[in-house]
Image (cartoon, rainbow, N blue to C red):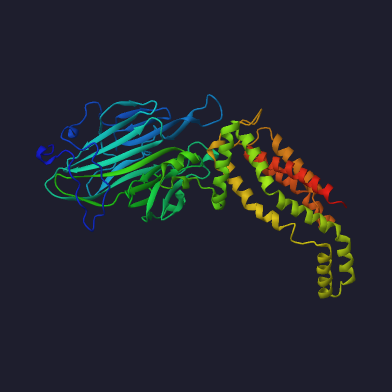
Amino acid sequence: MGPDKKQVTPAAPQNQPTAAAPAVPSSASAPLTTSALQPAPVSGPQKDIRVETGLYTAVFTSRGAALKSMTLKKYREQNTPDASQVVLGTNTDPALLTFSTRANGFNLPDNAPYTADTEAVTLSGSETRQLVFTHVSGQGFTVRKIYSIGADSYSIKLETQILNNSAAAMVGTIQQVMTYPPEPKVMDNRFDTAGSYLFTDGSLKVDKIKDVASATKRYDKNVQWAGFADKYFLSAILADKNSIASVELKKNAAGFMEATVSAPQATIDAGQSVTVTQHLFVGPKDIDILKAQGNDLVQSLDLGWFTVLAKPLLYTLKYFYGYVGNYGIAIIIVTIILKALFFPLTHKSYKSMKDMQKIQPKMAALKEKYKDDRDAMNKAVMELYREHKVNPLGGCLPMVVQIPVFFALYKALMFSIELRHAPFFLWVTDLADKDPYYVTPVIMGITMFIQQKMTPSQMDPIQQKMMLALPVVFTFMFLSFPSGLVLYWLVNNILTIGQQMYINKLVKD
């Protein structure tokens, strides 16, 4: 039987939580009413509801009022015009629903049947629309999930309401469940970093399926968001006013990675309701889009130890792309700027190496003269340094300072979706993929060899020959590197050759 209509009050006031029941964020929008408790005739069991916007095609299901898949219209699986669009989730695997609702303590079964208020939603421009799912339980409560969808955003507002239409108080926790396959069905380098990502207690936590294969992991300290991501795309649920109390990760019975996102526990008196408000994000890990979501979602773009440098470099790349319309040219511009910024340091470094090379004959003579007296030899060498105003560390320290910047740019180019399928010119049609004809890595190796030959050296002839083998090693390494990285290294080598030519002319033998 349905609930007693006298117990259902439009815009029912929210209960005040007890000490054992932390406050649950509530909303007075779209209140539960008597009419909402009647199953909608347009939505039967296992009904799919299709949502079309300018950014994606989403397929929701009445089973669990969950998201089955989201097809991103601006991104393709491969870099060809006829390639299929990127699909997050799947329409065919019943175990891969995401944002399916449980209600621990309310006896709401997994993937419970819901009815929807429409069969399809189509949005354009800046339109917004609500998609409402309702589940009338035989256990004395009603659940309603309200998805507020915008045509121009990857963000979806989710309000989960539970109405207690029984005669007694109910205590429970609203949960959203997400699942992720242990291994991608299509092998692609975008899945190199796939797994669970969440931001808790001010830091990013990343877990793979192997990390939860034998034991459940739980995070419950100031969780801002939780979800699953690969190298370029993310599906996540974001807290709204502390609406995520905990996240539990495990390997479920089907072998998938499962995240259970729990709201704070609540007590619902008879005839009262609670609403948990959260925000969903399913889309690209574009740094500007992520930052606009708030909740530190931008931290999902994990650029390693040098994030503090890598993200500004990525912003700089996007800035110049806005003017030149080509990320390859933007990489060249950024490389030139970095070279100019470090010119005083590298100039000092190469000049120091050149000066050290000039005094090598005198150092060899001192070592021969004082070969049986190490203290006297060290004293004589230091005096030689002072006489010629040479710092033996001058050739190393300036280069060490640049290493963090180089690694930061490497990370920015390697993991930015902006470079994915971004063309440069002619045969280089994807700066995030390797050069298909290996032209740029070979040219890069040649420039590196020239640079090695021009660099002043204090090593003996055998060591110098070993160093000349490095360009060959680097060339083979760079054959499979993203062409954007090879372009950066190539341009940097060319600029370094020019700088060394200038220094060699300045510092006469």
Q: Where residue 499 appears, x then y in whole percent?
A: 76, 45
Q: Is residue 489 visible?
A: yes
Name the residue furthest top: 82
Q: Is residue 252 visible?
A: no
Out of 258 and 201, give the one closest to the viewer: 201
- At 16% across and 49% down in the image, what residue appears? 269
Q: Quadrant of the N terminus?
A: top left
Q: Where residue 285 appears, x then y in whole percent?
A: 48, 40
Q: Quadrant of residue 33?
A: top left
Out of 111 and 482, give the one closest to the viewer: 482
Q: Where residue 509 appears, x then y in whole percent?
A: 88, 52
Question: In the figure, is residue 201 to the left or right of 242?
Answer: right
Count of residue discs: 0
Q: Where residue 259 appears, x then y in whole percent?
A: 37, 47
- At 13% across and 39% down in the image, what residue appears? 3
Q: Quadrant of residue 162?
A: top left
Question: In the figure, is residue 292 to the left or right of 177?
Answer: right
Question: In the figure, is residue 330 to the left or right of 154?
Answer: right
